[in-house]
């Protein structure tokens, strides 16, 4: 008999295909796990509406769990995902990977959040673009070590 | 009735997403190429949720793909504004800005409507739309209050697009009949926001002129047919294809 704890443990090994250092649990997109006999219902929520990784994530979860139980994956839109659901260890993993974790503020016109460089910690950084290689990131450059880096946008 | 409304929303998102996608690989600078592709992706994601809901409302007789790719021109209910060709960068920015102001007002109202699914889609979309509006508003100001050339090009775009903006705040018969926001109720708010940004961008607010509408009822400009023929080519060549 499979337990809820076993499923959560398995999900910890399912990586985000676009930022592979993060697991789906670090991202906070798994909202519920419900085990009933040999059936498992997993509720996930997309980060951004158009996140192309969602289909892959669903397939990866299914592959991970299907040996143990029949899997049903439900996509839930509300409550809408927020970067507040990123775990603390997830934020640290992002930083170690070279992506600045979400920084609040600077949401008005011509305002940018004050993001520190994930390499040298300098606060002297500049936003290069509001959008980046994936929906969840924007592009910055450190003005001290000149390293270009991604900022995982604060999404609320 | 409700399916008509959801299709109207979905079609508008889809067609604008397709238009923005046309810039991919052709934009003026890489950062803005990425910006437009990202916004297009958000819109396509939002329209998928809407088409899935429309399919459900229609008793799942048609799938989301069939609704998006296998209907005829007269069955599309998108606003005429979003099917207008990209023109130059200024034209695309002005079209996006007019739409974003409408889109944010719409989502702010939709989160309060009685339909749980539309509420959920709007709640999710709203966070994305706020970011789009900040981006397009900044570009309005940057270009409008920029060089003589950028100012003149953006003013031309604003003037030429103005007649299509009227439809954003008209209420269709299917909206009258449902418990959903009536766009005519936020006409004043749309004008106030647009005027404030145009003023900051040192642009003239166009005088009232011809008002074009009909898209919400399926009567389109000549441009939609061309978009659909390109967009639907795969489904019509290989019927039933899936990813």
Image: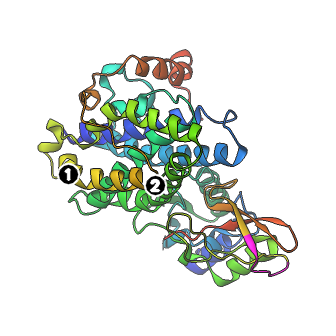
Q: Is residue A36 left or right of residue B31?
A: left
Instruction: Provide the secondary structure element on which disc 2 rests.
Output: helix
Instruction: Provide the secondary structure element on which disc 1 rests.
Output: loop
Q: Neighbour class for label 2 at 10 Å: few (<14), some, many (≥20)? A: many
Q: Is residue A132 left or right of residue B2?
A: right
Instruction: Report if the CB atoms under discs 1 and 2 are less than 8 Å apart.
Output: no
Looking at the image, tell me whether mark 1 or mark 2 is earlier in sequence order. 2
Q: Position of residue A51 (x, y in %)?
A: 58, 53
Q: Is residue A99 visible?
A: yes
Residue B25 belongs to the span the image colors magenta: no
User: Residue B167, relative to residue B182: is it above or below?
Assistant: above
Do badges 1 and 2 share one subunit?
Answer: yes
Q: Nearer the viewer, residue A63 or A31?
A: A31
Residue B64 appears in which quarter of the rendering?
A: top left
Residue highlighted by disc 1: B180
Residue highlighted by disc 2: B133
Q: Which residues are magenta?
A: A120-125
Q: Is residue B116 visible?
A: no
Chain letter of the residue beneath label 1 in the structure image: B
């Amino acid at each position: 008999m499979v337990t809820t704890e076993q499923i959560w443990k398995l999900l910890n090994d399912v990586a985000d295909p676009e930022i592979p250092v993060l697991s789906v649990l670090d991202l906070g997109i798994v909202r519920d796990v419900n085990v009933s006999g040999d059936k498992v219902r997993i509720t996930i929520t997309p980060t951004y509406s158009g996140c192309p990784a969602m289909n892959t994530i669903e397939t990866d979860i299914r592959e991970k769990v299907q040996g143990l139980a029949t899997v049903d994956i439900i996509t839930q839109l509300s409550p809408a995902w927020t970067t507040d659901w990123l775990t603390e260890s997830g934020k640290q993993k992002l930083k170690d990977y070279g992506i600045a974790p979400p920084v609040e503020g600077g949401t008005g016109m011509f305002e940018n959040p004050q993001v520190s460089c994930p390499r040298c910690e300098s606060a002297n950084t500049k936003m290069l673009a509001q959008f980046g290689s994936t929906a969840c990131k924007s592009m910055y450059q450190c003005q001290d070590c000149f390293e270009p880096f991604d900022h995982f946008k604060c999404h609320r | 009735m409700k399916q008509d409304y959801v299709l109207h929303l979905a079609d508008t998102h889809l067609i604008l997403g397709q238009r923005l996608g046309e810039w991919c690989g052709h934009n003026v600078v890489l950062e803005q190429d990425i910006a437009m592709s990202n916004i297009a992706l958000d819109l396509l994601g939002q329209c998928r949720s809407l088409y899935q809901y429309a399919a459900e409302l229609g008793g799942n007789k048609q799938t989301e793909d069939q609704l998006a790719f296998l209907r005829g021109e007269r069955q599309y209910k998108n606003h005429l504004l979003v099917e207008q060709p990209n023109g130059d960068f200024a034209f695309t920015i002005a079209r996006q800005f007019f739409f974003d102001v409408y889109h944010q007002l719409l989502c702010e109202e939709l989160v309060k409507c009685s339909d749980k699914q539309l509420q959920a889609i709007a709640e999710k979309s709203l966070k994305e739309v706020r970011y789009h509006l900040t981006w397009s508003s900044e570009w309005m100001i940057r270009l409008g209050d920029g060089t003589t050339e950028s100012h003149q090009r953006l003013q031309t775009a604003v003037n030429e697009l103005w007649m299509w903006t009227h439809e954003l705040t008209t209420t269709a018969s299917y909206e009258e009949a449902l418990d959903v926001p009536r766009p005519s109720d936020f006409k004043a708010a749309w004008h106030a926001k647009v005027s404030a940004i145009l003023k900051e961008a040192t642009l003239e607010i166009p005088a009232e002129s011809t008002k074009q509408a009909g898209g919400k009822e399926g009567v389109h400009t000549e441009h939609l047919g061309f978009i659909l023929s390109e967009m639907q080519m795969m489904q019509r060549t290989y019927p039933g294809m899936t990813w």
